[in-house]
Image (cartoon, helix red, strand yellow):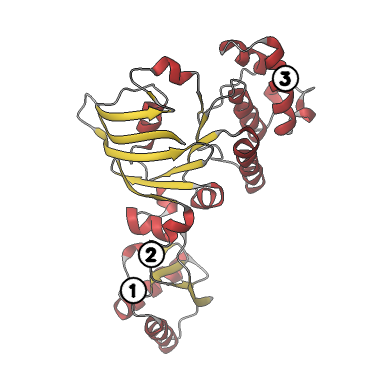
Amino acid sequence: MTAILVKELVKKYKNGVQALNGLTLSVNEGEIFSLLGPNGAGKSTLINVLTTYLSPTSGSVIMFGKNVVDEAAAIRTKIACVAQRTSIDTHLSLTENMMFQSKLYQVSKTEAQKRMKALISCFGLERYLKYPVSSYSGGVKRRLDIALNLMSNPKVLFLDEPTVGMDIGSRMAMWDMMKKIRNDFGTTIFLTTHYLEEADQLSDTICIMKNGKEIIQGSPNALREYLHQDMLKISFSSNEEAKSCFELLKSAIDLQESDLRRNKIITELKNGHHDLEKATRRLLEHSVSFLGIEIMQPTLEDVFIRLTGIDEKEAS
């Protein structure tokens, strides 16, 4: 079943800026859907339309059979949104926060206590019950924030860059939590992220957008198959070495500016192994020091850069 269906969505602000330009996408019920795009692509505007904060200029959004413009009140009972800033009241205890959230959505006390117990266990929050919320780390606050938003038992959970600023351990714990929310609660997750690895690891479906319009939508594997050629990767010990060798190799194997990625050069093998041989010969002829050269399958980052013209580091 389709949870969200967006067709030809346009949003033009009063100042003349057009943030969405005929966007079309669909989200299936019970999946993790990731929205990717460079800054200014229109991701935040889309989230605001989907969560009924903004009305579109034209086009349509149907969520579980209801129009988000005409039936916004009904839609709000089915969704929850976790923004980048947590919505926790640090003056209340963990359980007080959760019970307060349930009252906002008119959940009965008996049902609220049942949900709270399940969520505390699911999110591993038992150990923090005796400590004040103000003392929680950023990662624990984020887990509590998501748990709070699940107290209303939403059909769709919007997560706006939930792992930004987290260390790798906290980020991986958050990934496990998102999978549990999908698998154990059957909740559809609409995720925005700048971390391509995160989208690749978690998503059932990914949509890449730019300039207010979708470029491609599909599973991570389907997106990787967009690039039919293998990739050539040359690794160096520093960004400076990669940049210097980029100039040396540019004419030999037809490199583009987007092929220079920090301390690596990654480009499509336009002429198969002939490009590998030419690059290796040029490096050896000029006694260039490099860490390795290899042929590899395209990654999600390769697809993202090809379609948007911007790399992951610039996007974030």
Under mark 1, the amino acid is: Glu
Under mark 3, the amino acid is: Lys
The residue lying at 45 percent from left, 71 percent from top is 241
Q: Residue 114 carries which label?
A: 3
Q: Whole-percent x and y of residue 109?
A: 69, 10
**Who comes first in sequence, dot 3 or dot 1?**
3
The residue lying at 48 percent from left, 58 percent from top is 221
The residue lying at 47 percent from left, 66 percent from top is 263
Q: Whole-percent x and y of residue 75?
A: 44, 21
Q: Residue 129, relative to residue 293: is it above or below?
A: above
Instruction: Name the residue that disc number 2 marks.
Output: 227
Q: Do the residues labelled 1 and 2 touch (CB within 8 Å)?
A: no
Instruction: Name the residue that disc number 1 marks.
Output: 247
Real-space Cα separation, disc 2 to disc 3, in angstroms: 48 Å
Q: Are marks 2 and 3 in contact (CB under 8 Å)?
A: no
Q: Is residue 92 visible?
A: no
Q: How many marks?
A: 3
Real-space Cα separation, disc 1 to disc 2, in angstroms: 25 Å
